[in-house]
Amino acid sequence: MKNDLNTSQMLAAFEAIMKDGEKTETGRRLEGIEASTDYDGYNVYLRGNGVELHIGFHNTYNLTYDHEHLKDKFMAKIEALTKPQINDGHH
């Protein structure tokens, strides 16, 4: 059975990580999720918790993981990264 991911949410998480994350060798990392892209920007990668998500052209994607609970933790982090942040004046 295919998992139907919300690629818009995944790309929003990618943008958040690229904006606010720490620079790594291949991209940027935030909250334990690393975001990177290939040289032309057509392929986007999100990695963390033993999970790798590759989003390609036309929002095609491939999600790989060894254990369901790892995918669940990864998805929870993605969700946290894409929730609207409440600006409380502390930054």
Image: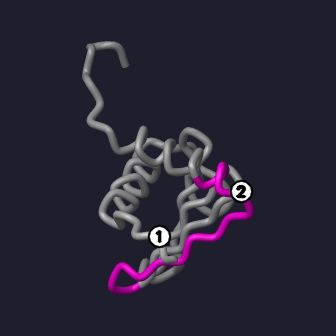
Instruction: Give the spatial CA distance, label 1 vs label 2.
Output: 17 Å
Callout 2, which amino acid?
Gly
Q: What element carries label 2?
A: loop
Q: Nearer the viewer, residue 19 or 75?
A: 75
Q: Residue 50 carries which label?
A: 2
Q: Quadrant of residue 46?
A: bottom right
Q: Look at the image and give the residue range highlighted in magenta.
A: 57-71
The residue that label 1 is drawn on is: 3
Expressed as whole percent of the image width and height from the top left, the position of residue 12 reads 33, 55
Q: Is mark 1 on a helix, strand or loop?
A: loop
- For the residues labelled 1 and 2, say whether their Cβ atoms are less than 8 Å apart: no
Answer few, some or many: residues within 10 Å of disc 2's Cα (few below 14, many 20 plus, some between 14 and 19).
few
Answer few, some or many: residues within 10 Å of disc 1's Cα (few below 14, many 20 plus, some between 14 and 19).
few
At a point 62% along the width and 65% down the height, the residue shown is 52
Expressed as whole percent of the image width and height from the top left, the position of residue 88 reads 27, 14
**Is residue 56 shown above or below 82?**
below
Residue 59 within the magenta-colored segment of the rendering: yes
**Is residue 15 shown above or below 63?**
above
Callout 1, which amino acid?
Asn
Lateral position of residue 42 relative to residue 34, left or right = left
Q: Residue 13 carries which label?
A: none
Q: In which quarter of the image is the C terminus?
A: top left
At a point 71% along the width and 58% down the height, the residue shown is 67
Q: Nearer the viewer, residue 15 or 6?
A: 6
At a point 44% along the width and 53% down the height, the residue shown is 18
Expressed as whole percent of the image width and height from the top left, the position of residue 4 reads 40, 70
**Is residue 90 shown above or below 17?**
above
Expressed as whole percent of the image width and height from the top left, the position of residue 81 reads 41, 42
**Is residue 40 shown above or below 82?**
below
Residue 51 within the magenta-colored segment of the rendering: no
Question: Residue placed farthest to the front in the image?
Answer: 1
Sequence-wise, the earlier of marks 1 and 2 is 1
